[in-house]
Amino acid sequence: MQVSRFLLMARRTGDETRALLLRVGMQMLLERGVSAGVQHIRLQEVLRRAGLTTGAAYRLWADQNDYQRDLAVSMVRLRLSTPTEYAQAAIDQLIADGASRDEILRAAAASHVESISVHTSDRERVRDTQQFLVTLALRATAETWPELREASHARHQESIDAFSAFTLSLMDAYGMRMKAPLAIEDFTAAMAALSDGFALRAIEGIAHPTIDAGASDEIGEGRWTLFALGLRALVNEFMTPTEDRGSPGVE
C-alpha cells in the first residue's frame, strides 16, 4: 500500500502538484470562510494536508506570498455554479404560470438574498454561498496583485455577459426594451453594483432589510426585500414597454 502510494506520488507532474496544492488551499478557504483571507492560508499547513514535503512546493513557488497570489487568483476564477443558475431556477415556473413582473422581480431578488446567507440547511447552497462571499472579499483586494485584478475583471465580465442574456430573455417575455441611449450592459452593471453592495453588507453581518407593503398601490402589494425594490427602480428607470406589443403579466 505504501509502495503504491509512493509510486503514484512519484508520477505526479509539476502541474498536477500545483493543481493539488491550490485545490487544497481553496478548500481551506471555503472551510474557514471570508474572515480567513489568503494570508491566513499557510503553505506549510497546505503541504501537511496534501501529504507533501516542503520541496514539492518550493519547486513551484518562490515563497509563501507567491503561493498566496496564485491561490487568490484561482479562487476568483473558480465557479461552483453559473452566475444566473439560482435566479433562473427561482423564476422558471413563475414565468410558465404567467406571473406578474413584480412577482418575477421579488423571486429573482429573493434568490440572491438567499445566496448571500449561510443560514440554510442546503449544504450545496452553503458551499456556493461561501465561495461567492470569499471571492467577493478577494475582489475587494484586487489591487494587491495585477494577476488578481485581471482575474477579478474577467469574472465580473463573465457575470455581466450572463446576466445580460438572462435579462434580455425576461425583457422579451414581458415586452420591454431599454430606454435610449442606455444599453443592456448599463443595466446589468448597475444591478451588479447593487448586488455586490448587499453581499458586502452580508459579510459585515448586516441582515437584509425587508418591507411589508401590504396593499400599497405605490410600490406594489406584498413583501419586498430591499434588493427587489432596488431592482424594480432600475427596471423603471432603464426600461420601457415596447411599442409593438403589450407586457403580459405586468400589473
Image (spheres, grey):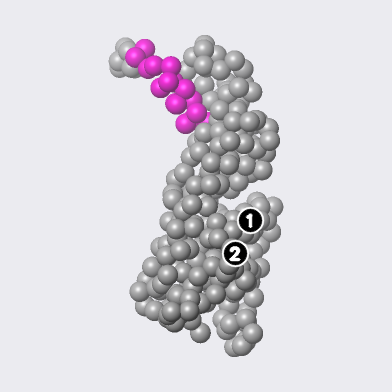
Query: In the rendered image, which residue does mark 1 sit on?
Result: 193
- Seen in the image, is 206 located left or right of residue 128? right
Q: Quadrant of residue 36?
A: top right
Which residue occupies 58% across, 42% down? 153
Residue drawn 58% across and 36% down?
A: 150
Give me the C-alpha separation between circle 2 and circle 1: 20 Å
Q: Point out the tag, 2 or 1, that comes first from the N-terminus.
A: 2
| Mark 1 nearby-residue class (10 Å; few <14, some 14–19, many ≥20) | few
Examine the image and state in which quarter residue 42 appears. Answer: top right
Determine which of the numbered discs, if any, sits on residue 78 in the image: none
Q: Position of residue 202 (x, y in %)?
A: 64, 55
Image quarter (top left, top right, bottom left or bottom right) of the N terminus: top left
Mark 1: which secondary structure? helix
Q: Residue at x 44, y 75 (%)?
A: 174
Where 116 falls versus 26 (above or below)?
below
Q: Amino acid at mark 1?
A: Ala
Q: Is residue 202 visible?
A: no
- Front one among 73 and 150: 150
On residue 181, which mark appears? 2
Which segment did they paint magenta? 9-25
The one nearer the camera, 145 or 209, is 145
Residue 245 in the figure: left or right of residue 212: left
Q: How would you classify the magenta stretch by its main secondary structure?
A: helix
Q: Amino acid at mark 2?
A: Pro
Picture coordinates of residue 158, whole percent (x, y): 49, 47
User: Which of the pair 42/218 is nearer the observer?
Assistant: 218
